[in-house]
Image (cartoon, rainbow, N blue to C red):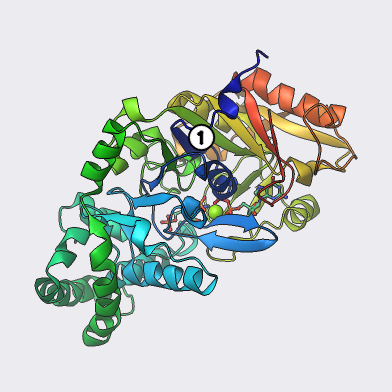
Amino acid sequence: MAADTSATNPRKSRVVLGLQWGDEGKGKVIDLLADRCDVVVRCQGGANAGHTVVVGGKKTVLHLLPSGVLHESSRCVIGNGVVIDPLALCHELDDLKAGGCDPVKRLFISDRAHLVLPYHRALDAAAEKAKGDAKVGTTLRGIGPCYGDKVARSGVRCGELRDLAAFEVRLRAHLTQANVLIRAAGGTEVEVERAIAEVMPACRRMAPMIADTASILHQASAQRLSFLFEGAQGVMLDIDYGTYPFVTSSNTGIGGVITGSGLSHKDLGEVIGVVKAYSTRVGGGPFPVELLGAKGDEVRKRGSEFGATTGRPRRCGWLDLVAVRFACRLNGVDSIALTKLDILTGEPEVPVCVAYEIDGVRVDTIPSRLEDLSRAKPIYERLPGWTQQLSGSTFDGLPAGARAYIGFIEERVGVPVRWIGTGPGRDEIVVR
Ligand code: GDP
Ligand code: IMO
Ligand code: MG
């Protein structure tokens, strides 16, 4: 592969997207790149995200705040495409402050972003309960109902917090109205006055951070500042291209970055896709490569695959290159950050799914119909494993099996792997 200095080029704009079912290790990659950019921007999703950053052995999980927040020099923007729960935001700010980080003065929240309010959480829970065994397995953070209100043109946006008295009146009306729906759905109604007493202080705290972030970003672009766009979830959870309806409620790919920030394709720069060296998924929905039984349990344990937001055990499977190829094509991915390769150390051989078989026919892409994807059986190619530990290695020092694994992904996907994760810590990564 031709030498490319842009992996270490200090200041250029980058987009970081998850290419699988979320939890690929985006937080770590963002944290790594954040000190080389001026503004870190979250564009979609909400507190359903859980992005882990490990610095000096200390673990921080970010949900709403951009993962660049730990760098004192980073300006952080929560763009209009994000749905924001004021209570979750304040909890997160408090936790960070207790750990010695107070980003309030460098945090800008879009006045066009929608608010996740207590009734959204109640409606999320009621919808899941009503679905029974067919439930999506959401994070119960109110994400779907909030985006639903946005699209139905009945949402409440952060800009409303500029007039808190008017907002309180509106909130009371929304809570009362939502209780009718919650009751009809068999859910637990929200106690109106109690909810208001809980939410209003958080809203008051948020109000000074609300800004016209699109204009701020336009100015930053005119000043040729660099951006780091932080994707949440992963392409297979995208509302359009994921395994619908077992998806989240936003566009998790490049489209969501543009509509959710207010910047244009000209501001994006390099698109980095984060790929875990194997596959995981939380919640329901088809997952052709899923390892059921002892092997799945072993990978889960070795990879500590428990949700960063909900603590739920993640379903585990081998790497699915059908999904990764599709995600790269959809999003114009320039380079891959391959994470958690260290977790595969010790496997005698590593199967990689290169295609599916559906009713005896070989298929090279993701079928749109859930019924078809549910019948897909993975077609594996088996690569030799390795036993040598990866942490602290250079690329050339990686065991031959690990290098061959990387080369196989590059060849089958057609995208270079430029970062290789060898452990959870900020420094445990090989940059090529
Ligand atoms: P995100 O949602 O994409 O940011 O990912 P999560 O934080 O939910 O899950 C990724 C998990 O893997 C976290 O616990 C990270 O600390 C950890 N992690 C990230 N990269 C690596 C790596 O290369 N090796 C190992 N062993 N762990 C990693
Ligand atoms: P990060 O950013 C993994 C999953 C949920 C559920 C579906 C819908 O940490 O990668 P939602 O609450 O969004 O309505 O749930 O999407 N999900 C995630 N899975 N990582 C995430 O975020 C996720 N965010 C949502 O488990 O299956
Ligand atoms: Mg996560």
Residue 74: x and y in percent read: 44, 50
Instruction: Say above or below: 47 vs 325.
Output: below
Residue at figure coordinates x 47%, y 41% from the top left? 243
Circle 1 SS class: helix
Q: Is residue 223 left or right of residue 95?
A: left
Residue at figure coordinates x 46%, y 56% from the top left? 136
Q: Quadrant of ligand 3?
A: bottom right
State which quadrant residue 156 falls in: bottom left
Instruction: Say above or below: 102 vs 404.
Output: below
Disc 1: CA contacts within 10 A as few (<14), some (14-19) or many (>=20): few
Residue wearing tag 1: 372
Q: Nearer the viewer, residue 49 or 297?
A: 49
Check the picture and name the quadrant holding the N terminus. top right
Residue at figure coordinates x 66%, y 40% from the top left? 289
Q: Is residue 345 left or right of residue 333?
A: right
Residue 159: x and y in percent read: 17, 59
The answer to whether residue 69 is visible is yes
Q: Nearer the viewer, residue 85 or 350?
A: 85
Tell me the amino acid under the disc marked 1: Asp
Residue 54: x and y in percent read: 64, 56
